Image (cartoon, rainbow, N blue to C red):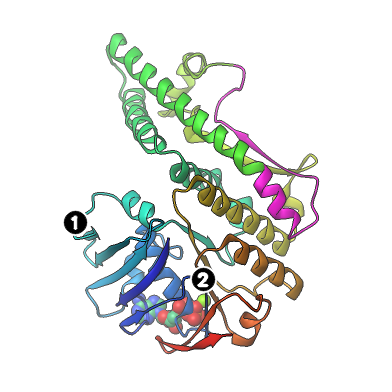
């Protein structure tokens, strides 16, 4: 997929803008505070209905404005165009539109516009809480396994039920057994999809990483969220007393994680920030390859502040990998010359200049 048109109004400091990006590489250069990250944030809002900068969305809405609106025209894999839009009001109301219809969930946006973000916070994928790695994993599974979303929704329903009776005490044993069965079935399905995904991701990730860094001893493994040797039913039965005490279910796919290790160490504990960023780039680019391979679409890469933490050699290696993915990329940086540098001569590169919330095309690099 690629964004053919983008219109943004009342996002951060951005003046109302309408843009026709290149289907390949788009470079956005401008001084600090000019609005470069805000452009990526607007695209992120369009694809995921949330920001990557703040948990709440009100800070994203321009001061003195009531609502932020982002609209995009997306070219789908089969060449058709899809119109998507999102409006978020200060009071909290949402509207998501896809091809003239109201959409019920952000997952529908994500299907039309799969996004990958690489920014100065990317190292958190290695260092942060398991939830961030689960989101990464589930992004990939969601986009290649159509049954995943249904299983995940079933899991959430069953977990809510179980946690509620864990906290409030009594439930009829037959109902409890039925919910535990539902929980176990959904969990096994999710585990199966995640496992298959990681199996496919691993070699692509290793291959991608090898083009960025020499870290042959780095390993990626998957923890499903409960003991490998026992069924979830068994584990749940064994931990019932403790679950009751805590008021929630401890074991299950809601506790899954990805582990990146070098020997017996956590990769995050020994790699430099720059190396961590490159490992995350390799993970995210590998996901793009799997998406291409599954023929479910292509993702759009948002790379905020490309030069941060990366030296010239690694920056160029990353450009190469993004070029090889053959998808649409938006890249920001303070210095346009640095951004322009490192692309193959035949890769179409469009350049934009951002200043005081205005964005102007500054040509195409031949
Ligand atoms: N809700 C808002 N309304 C108006 N301006 C905002 C809002 N939130 C942030 N800003 C301003 O937007 C500007 C652009 O920020 P940003 O996109 O991060 O710039 P860049 O990435 O180019 O350094 C900042 O100067 C900031 O003060
Ligand atoms: Mg920025």
Percent position of residue 81, x then y? 31, 63
User: Helix, strand or loop at disc 2?
Assistant: loop
Please say if 117 is above or below 296.
below
Percent position of residue 124, x then y? 59, 56
Q: Quadrant of residue 230?
A: top right
Of 204 and 191, which appears nearest the observer?
204
Marks 2/1: CA distance?
Answer: 29 Å
What's drawn in magenta, residue-wise? 203-229
Is 15 magenta? The answer is no
Near mark 1 (Cα within 10 A), the count class, few <14, some 14-19 or many ≥20, is few
Dividing the image into 4 quarters, which one contains the N terminus?
A: bottom left
Q: Which mark is residue 101?
A: 1
Residue at horizontal 25 percent and vertical 80 percent from the top: 64
User: Quick one: label 2 or label 1, which is nearer the N terminus?
Assistant: 2
Q: Quadrant of residue 305?
A: bottom right
Residue under pointer 2: 24
Please say if 152 is above or below 294.
above
């Amino acid at each position: 997929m690629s964004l053919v048109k983008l219109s943004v109004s009342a996002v951060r400091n951005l003046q109302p803008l309408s843009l026709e990006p290149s289907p390949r590489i788009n470079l956005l250069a401008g001084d600090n505070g000019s609005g470069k990250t805000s452009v990526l944030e607007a695209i992120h809002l369009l694809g995921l209905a949330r920001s990557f900068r703040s948990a709440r969305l009100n800070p994203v809405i321009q001061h003195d404005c009531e609502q932020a609106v982002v609209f995009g025209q997306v070219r789908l894999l089969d060449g058709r165009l899809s119109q998507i839009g999102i409006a978020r009001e200060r009071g909290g109301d949402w509207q998501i539109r896809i091809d003239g219809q109201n959409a019920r969930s952000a997952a529908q946006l994500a299907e039309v516009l799969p996004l990958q973000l690489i920014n100065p916070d990317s190292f958190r994928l290695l260092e942060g809480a398991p939830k961030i790695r689960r989101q990464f994993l589930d992004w990939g599974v969601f986009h290649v396994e159509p049954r995943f979303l249904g299983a995940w929704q079933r899991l959430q329903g069953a977990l809510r039920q179980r946690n509620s009776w864990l906290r409030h005490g009594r439930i009829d044993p037959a109902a409890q057994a039925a919910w535990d069965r539902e929980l176990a079935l959904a969990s096994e399905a999710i585990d199966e999809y995640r496992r298959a995904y990681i199996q496919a991701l691993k070699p692509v990730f290793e291959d991608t990483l090898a083009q960025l860094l020499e870290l042959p001893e780095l390993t990626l493994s998957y923890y499903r969220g409960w003991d490998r040797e026992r069924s979830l039913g068994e584990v749940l039965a064994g931990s019932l007393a403790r679950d009751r005490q805590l008021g929630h279910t401890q074991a299950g796919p809601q506790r899954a994680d990805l582990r990146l290790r070098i020997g017996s160490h956590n990769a995050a504990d020994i790699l430099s920030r720059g190396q961590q960023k490159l490992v995350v780039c390799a993970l995210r680019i590998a996901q793009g390859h799997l998406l291409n391979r599954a023929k479910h679409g292509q993702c759009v890469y948002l790379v905020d502040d490309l030069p941060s933490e990366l030296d010239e050699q690694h920056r160029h290696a990353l450009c190469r990998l993004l070029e090889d993915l053959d998808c649409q990329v938006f890249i920001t940086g303070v210095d346009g010359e640095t951004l322009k540098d490192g692309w193959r001569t035949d890769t179409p590169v469009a350049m934009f200049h951002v200043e005081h919330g205005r964005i102007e095309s500054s040509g195409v690099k031949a």
